[in-house]
Amino acid sequence: MVKKEKTEKEKWNQEFQAFMQSSGVTPPRSLSDSVFQMIENRLHPSQAMIFLKILGIHSVVSFLSLYFCGQFGVSLKDGSLGLMSVMMAYGETACMLVCGFVFISGSLGAALILMDIDTLRALKKVAPFHVTGLALLSLVAFLFVPSTYVTFSLALPWLIGAIVGGYGVCVGGIKLREHVSSLI
């Protein structure tokens, strides 16, 4: 067994020495350019593409969250308000803060799990803009749902919960992912 390992190491060393002594071959320019472009796109993804990825994830997760926490009177459970019925015991404002938090943070949490670490590092630089954009876009979408009840007094705490909570989940989740990836 020890002799086999030594033989493999010697073979590897001989192959490496042969590689080092060989004359370099320049790859075609188009191949070099495509490799550099691929690396550039991975290290610096476009912010529009990042937002579109988040929006795609949000369209699925936010729809599912309506099953557990109705938003502005919209719920996937017939006759049941889910988490909203529990939170209303603490008042309308507290309920809307939590609803905004749940609606946006669930989507951002899923995005943090599904997106690669390079994309998350790029997201970290502009997270407040993406979170705010996602919250505003969601609120505007609720305005187009016929059975919603959106007023300024409901929308403001919802937006605050969505933006502050979403940003906290985003920043905390990115730090956690970076820490975990540094351990691997």
Image (spheres, helix red, strand yellow):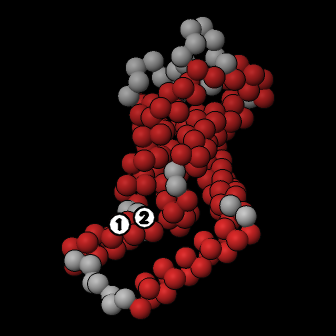
Q: In the rendered image, is residue 77 in sight?
A: yes
Toward the viewer: 97 or 118? 118
Identify which amino acid the numbered label 1 is placed on: Met
Q: In the rendered image, is residue 175 in sight?
A: no
Quadrant containing the C terminus is: bottom right
- According to the picture, the residue beneath numbered tag 1 turns out to be 38
Toward the viewer: 111 or 141? 111
Q: Up-down: is 129 above or below 74?
A: below
* Left or right: residue 42 compared with residue 2: left
Identify which amino acid the numbered label 2 is placed on: Arg
Mark-to-mark CA distance, 1 and 2: 6 Å
The image position of residue 100, as x and y in percent, is 60, 38
- According to the picture, the residue beneath numbered tag 2 turns out to be 42
User: Crowding at label 2, few (<14), some or many (≥20) Cα neighbours within 10 Å?
Assistant: some
The image position of residue 56, as x and y in percent, is 42, 40
Helix, strand or loop for disc 2: helix
Residue beneath the point at 54% across and 16% down: 76
Residue beneath the point at 52% across and 82% down: 14
Q: Up-down: is 184 above or below 136?
A: below
Marks 1/2 in contact by CB < 8 Å: the verdict is yes
User: Crowding at label 1, few (<14), some or many (≥20) Cα neighbours within 10 Å?
Assistant: few
The residue sitting at the right extreme is 90
The residue sitting at the front extreme is 3
Residue beneath the point at 75% across and 22% down: 86
Instruction: Give the numbered dot on residue 110.
Output: none
Quadrant containing the N terminus is: bottom right
Q: Up-down: is 110 above or below 63?
A: below
